Amino acid sequence: MQKIVIRGGARLRGEVRVSGAKNAALPILASSLLAEGRSIYRNVPALGDVRTMSRLLAKLGAEITAKPGGISHVDTSRITELEAPYELVKTMRASVLVLGPLCARHGRARVSLPGGCAIGARPIDQHLKGLAAMGAKIELEHGYVTARARRLRGATIVFDVVTVTGTENLMMAAALARGHTTLENAAREPEVEELARVLNKMGAKIHGAGTSLITIEGVDELHPVEHAIIPDRIEAGTLLVAAAITRGDVLVRDCLPEHLDAVLNKLRAAGVEVTADGDGIRVRGKSDLRPADISTQPFPGFPTDMQAQFMVLMTRARGQSVLSETIFENRYMHVPELQRMGADIVVEGRTAIVRGPTRLTGATVMATDLRASASLVLAGLIAEGTTEILRIYHLDRGYDRLDKKLRALGADVRRAKGSL
Ligand code: EPZ
């Protein structure tokens, strides 16, 4: 098992490129199941969750060829299985994204129920409610959900909560349903819009993706496509915070500012110099950071996937910042580890109060989930002395060689053999 070792103190300088978006690549790979034949995806990030999705598609009978430079060929000509097993789903709940496509294209899908995870209970009731509204027969048995339908039919679905993968699953299912579907209170994330872009390239008739009202006219057949995946806005946000927190000067390239407005506004509110620069965003960090309050919201609000990283930045601000986590009920697992490094953070329910500036000191800390691990890397960059981060498989699930990118910007970070 590997660990990451960081000697804090370096100011990050230079340029870094953002990889393809994990949360776009996963639904897009699953969408290949809606067509028969070979799809070609470019700018596919090299990370754990993409490998898990590829393993799942291969288990269903797809032929996956990963080529250098982030290219993936997915051939779905011979789908032989319609079941996503517990072994795979338990490692990555986004496996649930095969439910809609398999049910829509093959009339049946059996998927292990994801169960809870470190950051929350995360039920999939909205996914199932939507499929049932489209005429699927839903059965829950032995920890699995089975959805059956000779052919799904169009329906009007109103989400009780804004759900990203719920919107994606039902958009994919509706693309091959008979008739018209309306998704109300749909998620507006850029990854949802990107999936609709790919589905429309495959021959679907989807309108309104990126807004809370999406309409889909079902078609009888979809065809494979070639597509380059959008950049990862959360990786970009993490790198921008790394530059700001080390008082560095970094150009983060291949990212789309319009996907990061809420994050850029909060960086500016904290006194960080942020400028659009060519195909990227330049950040120049300052020593006197101001406190900033955030409340995580569905897009275009402040992303919950940036809450932990922003919390570390606020440990350097002069004053008190109030962070509210409104999306997940248990997304402060990084706090006890940051407190062990010297951070002054008090958590009350879904609110965290961060007081700064505090002097962080290096320690051995444990990663608990993907974004928590990113926040520990950021804390290690500014801590005095050495920080060792254990269980970094969490980080590798969602970041494409983050340590290598930070090293290229001057950080003293390396991997080493870990015991845990
Ligand atoms: C997606 O998860 C992302 N994952 C998450 O990123 C991200 O944190 C989340 O959206 C919110 O932005 C992928 O895209 C693969 P939700 P998802 O359904 O779709 C509740 C990362 O770090 N809910 O939008 O699973 C749910 O419990 C990951 O990259 C229901 O109650 O999240 C949560 O409180 C972590 N019933 C809220 O809605 C449902 O049927 C939003 O969850 C579905 C969701």
Image (cartoon, rainbow, N blue to C red):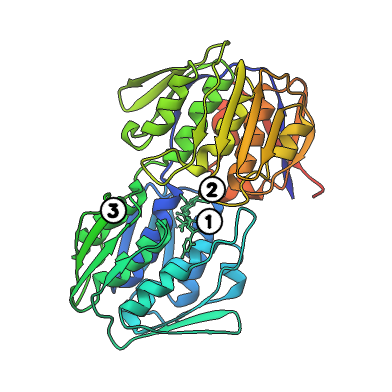
Give the mark nearest the N terminus, 1 or 3: 1
| SS for callout 2 | helix
Nearer to us: label 1 or label 3 = 3
Residue bearing mark 3: 212
Q: In x, y percent, where is residue 229?
A: 34, 48
What residue sits 53% from the left and 50% below the top? Answer: 47
Image quarter of residue 266: top left
118 above or below 403?
Answer: below
* Three-letter code for the amino acid on which mark 2 is drawn: Gly
Say the numbered circle drawn on residue 49: 1
Ligand 1 closer than 8 Å to label 1 CB: yes
Residue bearing mark 2: 398
Q: Nearest the camera: 327 or 312?
A: 327
On screen, residue 347 versus residue 258, left or right, reads right
Q: Nearest the camera: 416 or 210?
A: 210
| SS for callout 3 | loop
278 above or below 80?
Answer: above
Q: Residues within 10 Å of mark 2 (few under 14, many from 20)?
A: many
What residue sits 48% from the left and 27% below the top? Answer: 240
Ligand 1 closer than 8 Å to label 2 CB: yes
